[in-house]
Image (cartoon, rainbow, N blue to C red):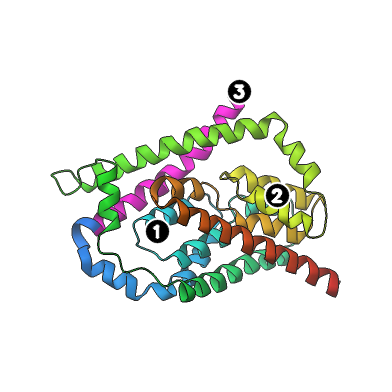
Amino acid sequence: MIEIIEHTLLDSVKLVPFLFLTYLVMEWLEHKAGSRTNTFIKKSGKFGPVVGSLLGAVPQCGFSTAASNLYAGRVITVGTLIAIFLSTSDEMLPILISEAVSPDLILKILGIKVVIGMVAGLLIDLLLPAKQEEHDHIHEMCEHDHCNCGQGKSIFYSALVHTARIGLFVVIITFALNLILHSGGEEVLADLLSDMPVVGPLIAGLVGLIPNCAASVVLTRLYVEGMMSLGSMLAGLLAGAGAGVLVLFKTNADRKENLKILGILYGIGVLSGIIIDFCFKLFA
């Protein structure tokens, strides 16, 4: 139990700086930049998926949570959010490096995730253009958390309130997930995620949806140990966004929209995994 608590706290503490900096920027946009900044972001948003997919490839758990907050405030588009979710890898890169995996293979894996994120994000923004909202979502979020932004409180105070509320939510859910994984869950996943065509990516995609960095650890370890295919691993890693999913459901009030985003992530991840496995077997 002590080990579970330690892992929970470590996983959660990593996110705090990202949460705080994200809310600080959003508060600044609300207080200082106003509608002019929002208009600029909307006009330049078509390049968001490209930048987002590149940033998402950085090996850390926090950027996806920042993206969820920015999307809930309608600072970035849904295509940019999905591009970040698809390219983020959580603990994949450190594990591949520590296991002495070939640098060429590591770069190929990262490149595949980034390209899929870019293409998917651009297509989604093309097919689902941003809605012209009549109200400010950043301001709505502030009112929802009762942090009194714009009423004599500093942007640091408001950012701290948001961070504390979301941070506590993440700690509770992360603890529950770690408890399950440490109680034999990892062994069960290993049995399910054996190297099976089509079925492997389908199951791996579901594992990837688990809102915890541990999912990327399990998927990468199983691939390194030869217990699952590259396509299956990528299916799970593409579908997974770590704690970003938790923050999305906490901060974005539209539950149907959140479920659609999860469905899109899962569909893209599984389809990509199946295609990758097919191509590797075809050209092997």
> Bounds of the magenta span?
1-29
Residue 126 position, x and y percent, is 47, 76
| Direction from residue 278 to residue 120 in the image, left or right | left
Q: Amino acid at mark 2?
A: Leu
Residue under pointer 3: 1
Residue 221 position, x and y percent, is 73, 47
Residue 93 image-quadrant placement:
bottom right
Asked whether 6 or 270 is in front, the reply is: 270
Using the numbered discs, state the Cα–Cα distance from disc 2 to disc 1 in whole angstroms: 27 Å
Q: Nearer the viewer, mark 1 or mark 3?
A: 1
State the residue at coordinates (40%, 58%). Answer: 71
Residue 284 image-quadrant placement:
bottom right
| Direction from residue 279 to residue 86 in the image, left or right | left
State the residue at coordinates (60%, 45%). Answer: 210
Q: Amino acid at mark 1?
A: Tyr
Few, some or many C-alpha atoms within 10 Å of disc 2 (few <14, some 14-19, many ≥20)? many
Report helix, strand or loop for mark 3: loop
Q: Of all residues shown, which one is farthest toward the top?
A: 1
Asked whether 273 or 104 is in front, the reply is: 273
Residue 281 position, x and y percent, is 84, 69
| Direction from residue 254 to residue 23 in the image, left or right | left
Residue under pointer 2: 219
Q: Main secondary structure of the magenta part?
A: helix
N-terminal-most mark, 2 or 3: 3
N-terminal-most mark, 1 or 3: 3
Asked whether 103 or 115 is in front, the reply is: 115
Report helix, strand or loop for mark 1: helix
| In the rendered image, the vertical position of residue 228 relative to residue 120, given as above or below | above
Asked whether 221 or 281 is in front, the reply is: 281
State the residue at coordinates (46%, 57%). Answer: 257
Which corner quadrant holds the N terminus? top right
Residue under pointer 1: 71
